[in-house]
Image: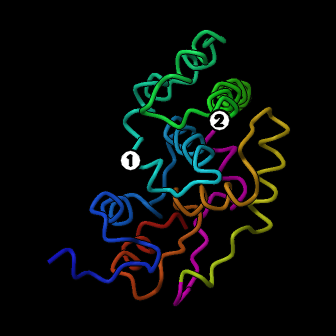
Amino acid sequence: MSDQLKRCGWVSSDPLYQAYHDNEWGVPETDSQALFAKLCLDGQQAGLSWITILKKHKNYESAFFNFDPEKIASMTSSDVERLMQDKGIVRNRLKIESIIRNAKGFIAIEEKHSFSDFIWQFTEGRTIINTWENFRDAPTSTGESKAMSKLLKKQGFNFVGETICYAFMQAVGMVNDHEVNCHCYQRTCDLAIK
């Protein structure tokens, strides 16, 4: 029975959270637009719990054109004002504006090389596989997440501090931080980019 599975200690009993942990978290993602969407959503989490953003995920997709960077980059101040009234997302002006800024940064990066290659360079294109017995032992930032944060900021991104970048790296499978006794650990090891 799925609710009897051993999961990482940070996962609550919320079925949405469990599905995210079981099916998405730690699975390597290499699609540029999917990486962009996830980075933006992780930025929205700043100061909040991830479940708050997870519950609003579909609303964010509706509000931001399914995270199409070209469409987002053309959004105006009137779009920001409209989204400030949208109860389906976090109504924080700086966070809304950050998604627009990040879309412009994404486009600038893509003019030179794929966003996926840009992101994965921080782990040399491979998944870092850790062996934590307790999720609390995992760091909140690393040299790689600090380097990513610094370079993303240089490209115009914001809400991409080193802690957000590390959470993003965990989520998109650049780092496998599933606990070793979690039922997803071996599967994500098998899926890891080596």
Q: CA distance from mark 2 to mark 1?
A: 17 Å
Residue 129 belongs to magenta span: yes
Image location of residue 77, percent across then percent down: 66, 12
Dividing the picture into quadrants, the one containing residue 43 is top right
Q: Secondary structure at mark 1?
A: helix
Q: Residue 38 vs residue 107: left or right?
A: left
Q: Along the line of sight, which residue is nearer the eye, 137 or 92? A: 92
- Against 52, residue 192 (above or below) is below
Residue at the location (65% across, 35% down)?
95
Q: Is disc 2 placed on a helix, strand or loop?
A: helix
Dot 2, crowdedness within 10 Å: few (<14), some or many (≥20)?
A: some
Amino acid type at mark 1: Lys
Which quadrant does the C terminus fall into? bottom right
Q: Residue 67: within the magenta?
A: no
Task: Please give the name of the residue rendered at 43% of the width and 78% of the height, measured from the top-left corner.
Answer: 8
Q: Which residues fall within the magenta stretch?
A: 114-134
Provide residue 121's location: percent of width, then percent of height. 71, 53
Picture coordinates of residue 42, whole percent (x, y): 58, 49
At label 2, the amino acid type is: Lys
- Quadrant in which the N terminus appears: bottom left
In the image, what residue occupies the spot 52% across and 63% down? 193
Compared to residue 49, the image places residue 83 above or below, namely above
Q: Nearer the viewer, residue 61 or 30?
A: 61
Q: Earlier in the sequence, mark 2 or mark 1?
A: 1
Location of residue 84 by image quarter:
top right
Residue highlighted by disc 2: 95
Q: Position of residue 136 (x, y in %)?
A: 59, 82
Q: Is residue 117 left or right of residue 57?
A: right
Query: Residue 130 or 45: which is nearer the viewer?
Result: 45
Location of mark 1 (residue): 55
